[in-house]
Amino acid sequence: MTDKLNQVLTTLDETSEAALSRLFELLRIESVSTDPAYKERCRAAADWCAEELRDIGFDARVVPTTGHAWSSATTGQRLPMALRMSSSMGTTMCSRRTR
């Protein structure tokens, strides 16, 4: 393995408990998108995702829609990786855009 890969794997090992803790924190937000009664909680999940992404250096925002809000984040680099964290779908979609 390369030194960079070893460094990544070591970092993952060292931070896995914190990562799982953040994941479980997000999962505790009752954001059931199929039930309109949870619309505010879906927004809370989108806010949580945007805040977490800002904390690690992304330019993140919550995008309101006619349905459920979602979080969008970019790295701000020339070829940004755009992340959409959909609290309503429970998924993360990544796409690379060129400017």
Image (cartoon, rainbow, N blue to C red):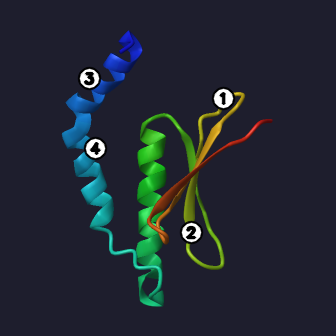
Q: Which residue is mark 4?
A: 19
Left or right of 78, for residue 68: left
| Up-down relation of residue 44 to residue 7 (above or below) | below
Tell me: 97 left or right of 38.
right
Tell which circle, 1 or 4, labels the residue nearer the N-terminal end: 4
Whichever of callouts 3 and 2 sits on the residue coming sooner in the sequence is 3
Percent position of residue 38, x then y = 42, 82
The residue beneath circle 2 is: 69
Tell me the distance, in whole angstroms, between the alpha carbons under discs 3 and 4.
Answer: 14 Å
Q: Amino acid at mark 4?
A: Ala
Name the residue type under label 1. Gln
Q: CA distance from mark 3 to mark 1?
A: 26 Å
Residue at (30% x, 64% y) in the render: 27
The Cα atoms of the two marked residues, 2 and 4, are separated by 24 Å
| Residue that label 3 marks | 10
Distance Cα–Cα, label 3 vs label 2: 35 Å
- The residue at the point 32 percent across, 18 percent down is 6
In the rendered image, which residue does mark 1 sit on?
A: 77
| Residue at image point 49% right, 34% down | 57
Depth check, mark 3 against mark 2: the one in front is 3
Mark 3 and mark 4 lie on one chain; the one further toward the N terminus is 3
Q: Secondary structure at mark 4?
A: helix
Q: Could you tell me residue 9's position as x and y percent?
A: 30, 26
Q: Which x, y percent locates residue 33?
A: 47, 79
Residue type, mark 3 in image: Thr
Nearer the camera: disc 3 or disc 1: 3
